[in-house]
Image (cartoon, rainbow, N blue to C red):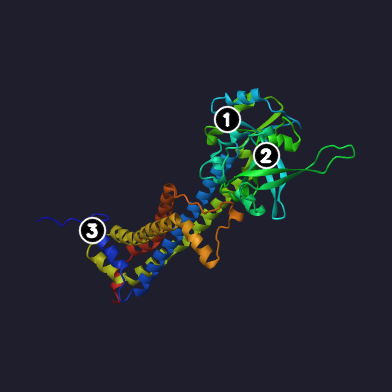
Amino acid sequence: MDQPSKPSPFGLFERTLALRYLRATRKGAGISLISIIAFAGITLSVATLIVVMSVMQGFRFTLLDQLLGVNGHVFLQPQAAEVYQDDGFVETLEDIPGVQMAVPVLKIEAFSVNGSIGQAPVYVQGMAKDDLLKIKEVSGPGAVLQGSYDAYGEGRFGGNGIAIASGVARKIGAQEGDIITLIRGGGKETPFAKLPTTQKNYRVDTIFSIGNYEYDNLYVYMPLVQAQVFAGKKGQITEIEMRVDNAMEIDGILPAIESAVDNNFIVFDWRDRFRTFFNALEVERALVRIILAMIIAVATLLIFNGLWMQVKDKNSDIAVLRTMGATNGAILRIFLMIGGLIGVLGALSGVALGSLIASNIGGIEKFLCGNFNTCMFPPDVYYLDEVPSIFEPSEVLGVLAFTLALSLIFSAYPAWRASRLDPVEALRYE
């Protein structure tokens, strides 16, 4: 006579019992309520973690793209007070393999005034037209709001046409074609004394938007020759900005750049210039990840509480299963599956909810800001004019693995106690 085969581990018998114990009964309604609360807690905590990490990753990549797009990747800063533009030297730098372009720049701190309408501090970037047109964040079709760069650099000493950022235009109330005044500290020598300031009128030919709050409220571009005239530094530059093919792998090209320059220049890259900013972002991201991981841990602790109460409630059922031939391992696996199911289902629901919110976070923020005057991401704090979000599959897989691991860990002890239950003691008073 054939012996009946034993149920296979995690087979239909064990899965059916695990699903049955998840449902509410008259005696154990409170237990299932705890399971529902644990499920909801895991769902919300996982969704929160995914939304926060997606937004922070979006901030990091968007800011990095803007910083590396508007600014150079490698900077050559002169050590001497006066360094004159040398076209041959710039061409030598551009011949280095991996270098896209080397741009001589004259930077001037100034003040912009539009009659009695408005005034604002500005950061003037003196740059040649060909170099400026290569910066798509400033000259691309999506960046130009008014006017064009057709007349940029045309005329005597580069002409009087300039390009101003949208935030500057808003502050001083300027439009395309308006005449504004730029004022800088320091002026020409006169027979009596040196003038305290220099001021000159310029025509607004272009209004652009970078999408970064700080840059849009400061930047003004002016032809390099005209900037040298305005600053009183004929033929001089303040630095050379270089752009390379791959800014993330810049260490491989720095030695060639350093060997090409003499001791008149200090060589540093974008990581040095923006180190403090990005270090702060990374620290904040790590701390937020730890805090939200602790929230997930608290939610999964409810699995332990629910399973513990369920083991107490199902003592007689466990004893009957043991007398019918269920092994210790089968009982252990049944309760492990209960905790694992709550964790997995909660994590998957959290991923779905978090992905939905993360993909629509911009519209949600605009709705709350417009209807309830609750702006969660003010541009003057976060520098961006909209909320970016980047959904990373690796982050999701990490969250799923972490949640499942905690669910199994917190389910292990109640499941082990259930497997060690003595059926004789459990049925003695039944």
Which kind of residue does numbered mark 3 sit on?
Leu
Disc 1 target residue: 101
User: Where's residue 31, x and y in %?
Assistant: 36, 71
Give the position of the N terminus as an image quadrant.
bottom left
Going 54% across and 28% down the picture, which residue do you hit?
98
Going 69% across and 54% down the picture, which residue do you hit?
118
Mark before the other along the chain sequence, 1 or 3: 3
Give the position of the C terminus as an image quadrant.
bottom left
Which kind of residue does numbered mark 1 sit on?
Met
Q: Which numbered tag is attached to residue 336?
A: none
Going 64% across and 22% down the picture, which residue do you hit?
88
Which kind of residue does numbered mark 2 sit on?
Asn
Q: Residue furthest right?
A: 192
207, 105: nearer the viewer: 207
User: Where's residue 308, x and y in %?
Assistant: 39, 67
Going 39% across and 55% down the picture, which residue do you hit?
404
Disc 2 target residue: 160
Closer to viewer: mark 1 or mark 3: 1
Asked which secondary structure carries label 1, the reply is: strand
User: Where's residue 8, x and y in %?
Assistant: 23, 54
Q: CA distance from mark 1 to mark 2?
A: 26 Å
Is 300 rendered above or below residue 154? below
Residue density around tag 2, few if under 14, some if 14–19, many if 20 or more, within 10 Å: many
Is 429 rendered above or below residue 160? below
Disc 3 target residue: 12
Q: CA distance from mark 2 to mark 3?
A: 82 Å
Question: Do the CB atoms of the residues marked 2 and 3 lie less than 8 Å apart?
Answer: no
Mark before the other along the chain sequence, 2 or 3: 3
Q: Quadrant of residue 3?
A: bottom left
Residue 387 visible here? yes
Q: CA distance from mark 1 to mark 3?
A: 66 Å
Asked which secondary structure carries label 3, the reply is: helix
